[in-house]
Image (cartoon, rainbow, N blue to C red):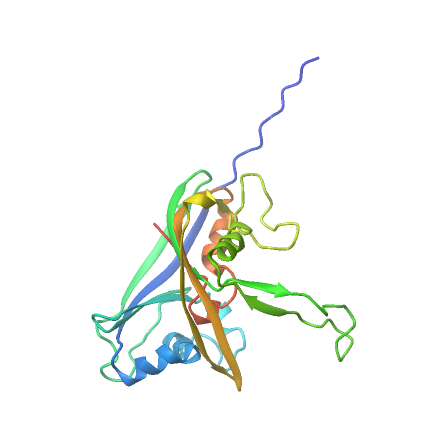
């Protein structure tokens, strides 16, 4: 008796609805210069555009706003360009006089993604590896789990491997067996363009911050639209409060 297997249905399309704001700041202004040497100040600049949307002091304000941002510096023109992604449009009219080199521009993004669709992408990530030495349940001071530390990945082959672990081949689950959350898309790793960027630093609550950064560009094929939209919405990797993890596609 012959039996014919019914092919698995294609994943349903998924829709991304968000706001992008384009900000251009004068890099020679003292306010901007401070943000360039202290990534925590850069975070404050971005979050300052959303006053009143969430309760003051809320520990998860950025997550509630679904706020991510990316930035580049044009040294020749002395411009700091930011792309801010958020659930609601921001308002940076409260910035100090002379900081804005151009008026902010808000763009509504409303796009549907389908399995098999190819998109060009760019992202700046904070590639790290977790060190789990001493990560033993019940070994913490209150009986909890001791948290591991994170090691920055600075070599191109390390960064590429970090990103490849987050790719999602067709039919693969959105979360890998080792717990890594995948991005709902796949690509040929050999076609990825990768550039190691200068690290950034700052201070947060008397604690030093130092983030490694790397830029990745290429073409992705969407395999799981829902997981892909989730990755575009929440960002990829760590450092999302400091300009890492935003995935821009076209």
Residue at point 38%, 74% (across, down): 46
- Left or right of residue 22: residue 215: right
Residue 161: image x %, image y %?
Answer: 53, 52
**Nearest the camera: 168 or 57?**
168
Where on the picture, by quarter, is residue 197? bottom left
- Left or right of residue 63: residue 112: left
Please say whether residue 121 is visible from this viewpoint.
Answer: yes
Where on the picture, by quarter, is residue 215? bottom left
Report how many numbered discs are placed on residues in the image: 0
Q: Residue furthest bottom?
A: 206
Residue 226: image x %, image y %?
Answer: 51, 48
Where on the picture, by quarter, is residue 129? bottom right
Residue 88: image x %, image y %?
Answer: 39, 66
Whether 125 is drawn above or below 120: the answer is: below
Residue at point 44%, 79% (across, down): 40
Residue at point 77%, 68% (across, down): 137
Please say whether residue 220 is visible from this viewpoint.
Answer: no
Residue 175: image x %, image y %?
Answer: 61, 51
**Nearest the camera: 20 or 241?**
241
Q: Which part of the image, by quadrant, shows the N terminus?
A: top right
**Nearest the camera: 27 or 182?**
27
Whether 1 is drawn above or below 114: the answer is: above
Residue at point 42%, 68% (across, down): 243
């Amino acid at each position: 008796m012959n039996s014919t297997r019914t092919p698995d249905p294609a994943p349903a399309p998924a829709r991304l609805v968000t706001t992008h704001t384009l900000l251009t700041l004068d890099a020679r202004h003292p306010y901007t210069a401070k943000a360039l040497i202290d990534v925590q100040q850069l975070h404050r600049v971005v979050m300052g555009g959303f006053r009143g949307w969430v309760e003051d002091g809320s520990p998860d304000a950025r997550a509630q706003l679904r706020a991510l941002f990316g930035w580049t510096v044009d040294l020749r023109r002395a411009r700091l360009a930011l792309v801010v992604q958020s659930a609601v449009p921001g308002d940076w009219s409260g910035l100090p006089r002379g900081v804005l080199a151009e008026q902010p521009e808000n763009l509504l993004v409303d796009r549907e993604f389908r399995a098999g669709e190819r998109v060009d992408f760019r992202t700046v990530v904070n590639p790290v590896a977790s060190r789990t030495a001493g990560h033993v349940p019940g070994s913490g001071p209150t009986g909890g789990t001791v948290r591991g530390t994170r090691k920055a990945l600075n070599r191109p082959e390390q960064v590429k491997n970090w990103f490849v672990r987050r790719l999602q081949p067709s039919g693969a689950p959105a979360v890998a067996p080792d717990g890594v959350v995948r991005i709902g898309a796949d690509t040929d790793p050999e076609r990825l363009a990768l550039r190691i960027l200068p690290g950034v630093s700052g201070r947060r609550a008397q604690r030093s911050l130092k983030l490694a950064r790397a830029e990745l560009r290429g073409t992705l094929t969407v395999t799981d639209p829902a997981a892909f939209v989730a990755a575009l919405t929440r960002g990829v990797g760590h450092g999302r409060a400091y300009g890492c993890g935003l995935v821009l596609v076209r």
